[in-house]
Image (cartoon, grey):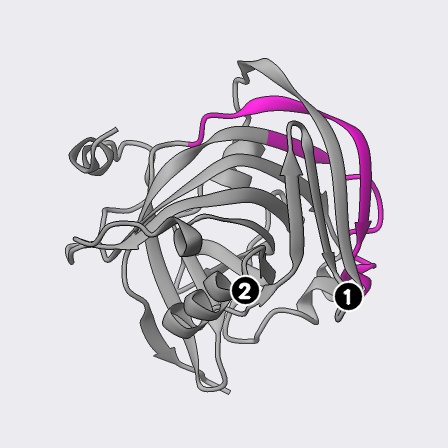
Amino acid sequence: MTIKEILSNTEHRPWKIPAEKWKYYQEWNDVVFLHWQVDYNELKKFVPDDLEIDLFESNPWVSLVAFTMEKIRPRNLPAFSPVSDFDEINIRTYVKKDNKQGVYFLSIEGGTKISCQIAKGLSELPYRYSKMARQDNLYYSENMQFRDRLEIMYEVGKELIEKTELDKWLTERYALFQDTLSSINEFEIHHIEWPINKIELREIGIEYSRFNKLLNNRPLRQHYSPGVQVLAWDKKRNIKLG
């Protein structure tokens, strides 16, 4: 799909595309979504006071998203595959700021050291390196420093699903809010509506000790997507209130 076609496909968005020019292109491919309904008070320990935890029917959610980042590049520059292509895992929750819905990363890992260093330097997102491996229907990650581990084996359904309101609430997010020492950074993104398939988890092993009260059972919901092409705008800084 061309950039022009992506930008013209906006019916699914909750607000208009930013008036400024986008700054980065990237692809999020071969995506596994795992979703947990969690305890509000436990989740609040990880979310800055400047952000409001978003709720679906009075309940908060946390998701683990494992995918392959590809072709990430600045506007008007080509991608360089040793840096632009890498596996990524993020653990995110759902938040609001000034009534705008978005996501907040509890954790974000990349499978290439230099990619993590560059991404962290440019975006101020809390990237860290973890050893990762992907094969057909298998995703593996391990971080010895944090003692984090993910291993999932799965089978993808052939047909796209008819999405529920919860499915859309969990996947269709067009803003990211992330804290630094002095600010809450806001990122706007745009892509077509996620194409979603069913996925069956054959085996699952998740060990993130910091989040053991959030990711403490098999996920209540899971999705698979072949991926989307993503346009991202530069970050906007909001000074912290606290």
Left or right position of 25 against 113 = left
Answer few, some or many: residues within 10 Å of disc 2's Cα (few below 14, many 20 plus, some between 14 and 19). some
Left or right position of 31 against 193 = right
| Residue on which the image places disc 2 | 113
Q: Amino acid at mark 1?
A: Met
- Membership of 205 in magenta stretch: yes
In this orientation, does residue 30 appear?
Answer: yes
What residue sits 57% from the left and 74% below the top? 48
Q: Which residues are magenta?
A: 194-223
Mark found first going from the N terminus, 2 or 1: 2
Distance between mark 2 and mark 1 Cα atoms = 14 Å
Left or right position of 87 against 80 = right
- Membership of 72 in magenta stretch: no
Say the numbered circle drawn on residue 144.
1
In this orientation, does residue 58 appear?
Answer: no
Figure disc tally: 2
What residue sits 77% from the left and 54% below the top? 149
Q: Secondary structure at mark 1?
A: loop
Q: Quick one: 165 or 121, which is closer to the camera?
A: 121
What residue sits 62% from the left and 16% below the top? 157
Horizontal and vertical percent position of residue 145:
75, 71
